[in-house]
Image (tube, rainbow, N blue to C red):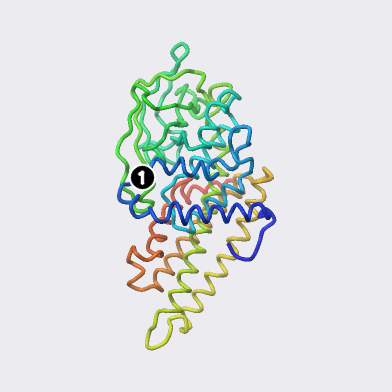
Amino acid sequence: MSAYRPSWLTEDMAIFQQSVRRFAAEELVPHEERWAKQQHVDRQTWLRAGEMGMLCPGIPEEYGGGGGNHAHNAIIGYELAYAIATSLGTNVHSAISAHYLLRYASEAQKQRWLPRMASGELVAAIAMTEPGAGTDLQNIKTKAIRDGDHYVINGSKTFITNGHHADLVLLVCKTDPSLGAKGMSIIVLEVADLPGFRRGRILDKLGHKGQDTSELFFDDVRVSVANLLGPVEGQGFVQLMQQLPEERMFIAMNALGAMQRAVEETIKYTQERKVFGKPLLDMQNTRFKLAEMQTTVTIARTFIDDCLDKMIRHELDAVTAAKAKWWASSQACQIIDECLQLHGGYGYMLEYPIARLYINTRVMRIYGGSNEVMKELIARSF
């Protein structure tokens, strides 16, 4: 990040940030091209991330975590986006899934799952989206019908980050389909050798090529009622609505990292690239465009830092998070598009960082709730 330091970025946080930056440079970036071809990271990388303290840093030490807060997760998201190291799905694992468990799981469930998530022994995914239900979570069809001391689960999920490697799946389903949103629950599945559970193909995406995104299928899967997340059924939709603002803030932080890297790459490129006998940066249009971009990045950083400060204090509301998510992701896409234009034909080549930033950033306007839905959420607050 720049010389500007927000209030939440303490000296200890700054040291942690440097550790994340080294981890990305040494353990992730050198393998990104190979992972993109195989469509997933090496399983050993999760264990290595656990050894280096890169997993579950915001989880208390008593559960094997780093004892930090959401600022640690935000730093990881920023640095990996900045490094264009998008293959390791730490956001879903550490910043999202682990915090569902921390907030809603029983003590026995926390002790059972969180330490192994922090070590990388368990890889976690949260399964919300279905072929016919994305942002409209109330329309999910996957059912978990109670049969004695077990739930019998049938349904399918798609676009599931970490789906190929996941050992632990937080499944959003209907435990009482007749109640609509009030009949939704989250059930945690340990899927290794689980009868009736199967993984579909790893989906071939436009960007984030090395991050395994898969289909999941559940055919008469039986799981103990003890795996329900929360003390009673029907709390799933409430849990999702409480946690989604935090997920959206991490998307905003990723967008900030991507746009910062894009501007830096473009300044460097335009200093070196000669057009009509002089550096491209000497041309007024280039200077003006970059001035506009730098201003936007500064505004984005200030806004996102303020939102993150609120999130750490547990004061972030859903409307503000929606504003941060849609605006930051939209600005990142616009800035990166203009940066690519300034690169000319070279910007279209994947060997250049700006091309990879371009394809990886586009999805930010879709996942975590589409930007159109974010605006609707904001409008409802009028």
Question: In the image, what residue occupies the spot 57% across and 44% down?
Answer: 245
Whole-percent x, y for residue 96 in the image: 53, 40
Element carrying mark 1: loop
Q: Which residue is at the far bottom? A: 277
> In the figure, 3 relative to 280: above or below?
above
**Horizontal placement of 275 versus 60: left or right?**
left
In the rendered structure, which amino acid carries the disc numbered 1?
A: His
Callout 1 crowding tier (Cα within 10 Å): few <14, some 14–19, many ≥20? many
Whole-percent x, y for residue 95 in the image: 54, 42
Whole-percent x, y for residue 171 in the image: 45, 30
**Horizontal placement of 379 versus 273: left or right?**
right
Question: In the image, what residue occupies the spot 61% across and 50% down?
Answer: 320
Give the quarter of the image for residue 143. top left
Give the quarter of the image for residue 242. top right
Comparing 4 with 364, the one in front is 4
In the picture, the quarter occupied by the N terminus is bottom right
> In the figure, 288 relative to 327: above or below?
below
> In the figure, 307 relative to 266: above or below?
above
Question: In the image, what residue occupies the spot 55% across and 44% down?
Answer: 53
Give the labeled residue for mark 1.
40
**Horizontal placement of 215 versus 1: left or right?**
left
Question: In the image, what residue occupies the spot 47% across and 21% down?
Answer: 176
Give the quarter of the image for residue 359. bottom left
Whole-percent x, y for residue 268 in the image: 46, 74
